[in-house]
Amino acid sequence: MEQHKCNFSNKKLAIVFPGQGAQCKGMGLDVLNDNPLFHQMIEIAEAKTGLPLEEVITQGDERLHQTRFTQPSLLLAIILLYEDLLKNYALPTAVFAGFSLGEYAALYASGVVDIAVAFSLINERACATQRASEQEPGSMAAVLALDNYKVEEICHRVTSYNNIVTIANYNCPGQTVISGHKDAVAEAGKLCLESGARRVMPLQVSGAFHSPLMHRARLEFEPLLNAFNFYEPHTPIIMNATAKPLQFDQLKRNMAEQLEAPVRWEQTINLFKETGIQCVLEIGPGTVLAGLVRKTAPDIDVFSYNKTADFELLKGWLKNHELI
């Protein structure tokens, strides 16, 4: 996209939020410190999902890695960390983006949804994707050091009516994730290695996310969106399915499409680069997104904020970039 067609108000900071796979024991709970606002947020999240999210995060048992629990637990951790940061600084954010589930944190941060709607939506999404995974099992695999176009060509060659494989994630140059029926993913992985991929790594996931195998989830989830109130974002959001800023009249379509469309993260970071973003702040557990940004746009400076113990380091980073 040409720079003059996408203007982020001359601000230079993008904030990004991670997706499923980043979850870990205790994530986000270090911000509590008897803060009544954060405890109230947990109560709302647990009421809207019907799940003991604080207990799940605290114990870090097998539930934390089950889609039904993972998605709302991770969203809660991200929002707690984000709100903890906001209580100290009003950051001059140019744009938000989130990786898969992280897109819901971006919708919250930009004011499109309030916290009650965010957790109602993620609850419905988690239930729909888990049911789709049980009804039509699949798998995913990361492909390293092979051109995107070659991976696309292999997926197209392997796919048949009832044996589907497609790219689920465009992570960064030379790194994609394929998703679909188990046999198709295995065959595509084999062909990728024969075509020069350095490595193909099966992923420990509960379903074939961001592939046509999630079509049932989309059919279940999309009609539910009409029951919720959405608001125009106060800050632009780059949507996963398009790698373009949200057009508000396309919001519900984008949210539904995201379930079976690829996450275009490499294209999102390229858009940041083209539009003058100089700094990216990752908020949430892990550092995966920071690594993908560095591989895609080495000139963009990145910081991962995933625990309050790093607050002073973050403060220094923000000051160095004249963001506070």
Image (cartoon, rainbow, N blue to C red):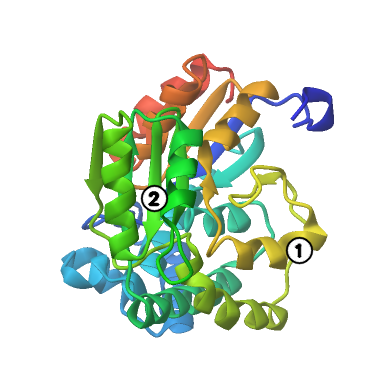
Please provide percent x and percent y for residue 3. Answer: 77, 24
- Asked if disc 1 and disc 2 are in contact, CB closer than 8 Å, the reply is no
Task: Name the residue that disc number 2 marks.
Answer: 178
Marks 1 and 2, how far apart in space?
Answer: 34 Å
| Residue 77 in view in this figure | no
The relative height of residue 312 versus residue 86 in the rendered view (above or below) is above
Q: Residue beneath label 1, please?
A: 231
Q: Position of residue 312 (x, y in %)?
A: 36, 28
Name which residue lies at 72% across and 62% down: 251
Q: Would residue 165 appear left or right of 6 to someone viewing this image?
A: left
Q: Residue at x 65, y 65 (%)?
A: 113
Please report the residue visible at 62 percent of the width from the left and 57 percent of the height from the top: 107
The image's mark for residue 246 is none
The amino acid pointed to by label 1 is Tyr
Residue 232 seen in the current view: yes
Task: Indicate left or right for 241 with 76 as reference.
Answer: right
Q: Nearer the viewer, residue 23 or 26?
A: 23
Q: Residue at x 69, y 83 (%)?
A: 227
77 left or right, relative to 266: left
Instruction: Tell me which amino acid carries mark 2.
Output: Ile
| Label 1 crowd bin: few (<14), some (14–19), many (20+), radius 10 Å | few
Query: Relative to the observer, which residue lies in front, 32 or 196?
Result: 196
Q: Position of residue 284 (x, y in %)?
A: 39, 47
Q: Position of residue 231 (x, y in %)?
A: 76, 63
Eyeballing the image, is 221 above or below 202?
below
Q: For mark 2, does the 10 Å Cα neighbourhood hold few (<14), some (14 to 19), or many (20 or more) residues? A: many
Q: Tell me the SS state at disc 2.
A: strand
Q: Is residue 89 above or below residue 160?
A: above
Front: mark 1 or 2: 2
Mark 1 lies on a secondary structure that is: loop
For the N terminus, the image quarter is: top right
